[in-house]
Amino acid sequence: MMISTWRKRRAARLAGKQLRPESETGDIHEVTIPNHFRCPISLELMKDPVTMSSGITYDRESIEKWIEAGNATCPMTNKVLRNLDPIPNHTIRKMIQDWCVANRSYGIERIPTPRIPLSSEAALEIHSKIKTACRKGDQAGCQNLAAKIKALAKESERNKRCLVAAETAGVLSSAFEEFSKASFDDHVAVLEEILSSLAVLLPHDKASTYLGSDASMDCVVWFLKSEDLSTRRNAVLVLKELVPLDNRKADMLSETEGAVEALFKLIKAPICPTATKASLLIIYHMVMSSSSSPTNAKTIATFVDLGLVSLLLEMLVDAERSICEKALGVLDGICDWDQGREKAYNHALTIPVLVRKIHRVSDLAMKFSVSILFKLCMNEKRGNGGVLVEAIQRNGFEKLLVLLQVGCEERTREKATQLLKLLNVYRSRVDCIDTVDFKNLKKPF
């Protein structure tokens, strides 16, 4: 019975019909969709009919996918389209809505009247109004326009693409800088709204031109320290687009009061995976920037004193791939420093986690894991080979051998080879235990 009904539904769809149960008895009735209500591409009932320059009407979603795929011809006639902008066909849309209402007894719902998508001309008009509001110091006007941009971007992906193509992020960033230069306390509301809108539109290269200024960076960090979770999320997403582009911005962020503590808090008390990944990426660039500049050792020391090493190791036990890669990258940078390595030496999870991640996550995670192990083993000052012994106990020797067999980049291969030579000295003295057995470890948390 179920197979028969499925076959009927499949045949009906191919014939342009919809099957609807008339009552609870399950009796099936066919409702034929008029051909001119069906999209020639999807063969489905059109929800937003638009007409192209060829005179053929399609559903907007279908024809836009066709054009975005690089096609410039009409799918039905194969003629070159003189204009790629679809024109809403209100007549057909109204007829479809009337037909839906007439057949509602068969369970057919009336299609909603579609919103008119944003055009590039409309986007540029909003830009002009924002610039005028900034010149006049019109905080309320600029705030309303930023909120409008955010609403348009969230309304549809098409709108968002239009706003990004029109470089709206650059205009908003410029406005953010203008208001951040003035009295911050008087412009908190408009700055927060602009930041929220930017978080929706980024990534965008133009934004970094303005947001990288001292005034803008101070304001973003102020929001990063906010008690409001949404505001903190927006701030860290914006910073994620700035810091990786320029080491000077990483240094500037490191020197901004409260930035290090605020980023650590986002790791310790996660808001969402997106914010956690953004925070780890920012910290990675701050740490790597500090690694190349002894004057910025204070940044590393602050992160270590806050407990970042322990937090990363605990996170790595069961983190998903992207977070695992970023956490290992941060730990690798911190282990360039004596303070970081000392914390890693004293944590029960360090060696078990690093050995386990060599093969279980990704090539990038493997690269960082080998690098951290190499730094710990080469810089151990105790002289008793404690790290090397534990690495052997956790099957580190075997995993490094497999790594050389399956292949890896040259620098990682060199580190793995040196590690094997160091490990081989202690190999005959210890027994191996399972790297996944964390039950008997004494965790300092």
Image: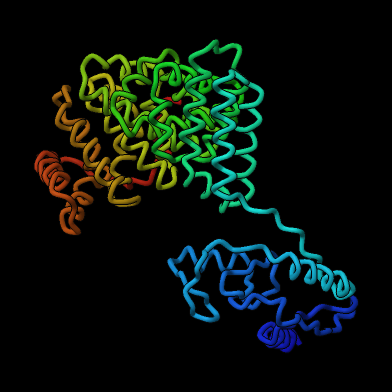
Front residue of this view, candidates 90 and 115: 90
Q: Quadrant of residue 113?
A: bottom right
Image: 123 above or below 94: above
Instruction: Give the residue drawn at x 22%, y 26%.
Output: 336
Q: Is residue 102 visible?
A: yes
Instruction: Give the residue drawn at x 63%, y 69%.
Output: 51
Q: Quadrant of residue 216?
A: top left
Would residue 209 be found to the left or right of residue 394 on screen?
A: right
Front residue of this view, candidates 284 and 43: 43
Image: 118 above or below 268: below
Would residue 118 be found to the left or right of residue 222 on screen?
A: right
- Specify how the rendered protein is coloured: rainbow
Would residue 206 be found to the left or right of residue 342 on screen?
A: right
Instruction: Give the residue drawn at x 25%, y 28%.
Output: 335
Q: Quadrant of the N terminus?
A: bottom right
- Find residue 421 and report its horizontal and vertical position in percent: 9, 42
- Find residue 326 and report its horizontal and vertical position in percent: 36, 39
Instruction: Give the residue drawn at x 47%, y 74%.
Output: 80
**Badge count:** 0
- Find residue 346 and report its horizontal and vertical position in percent: 31, 24
Q: Is residue 428 visible?
A: no
| Residue furthest front as drawn | 82
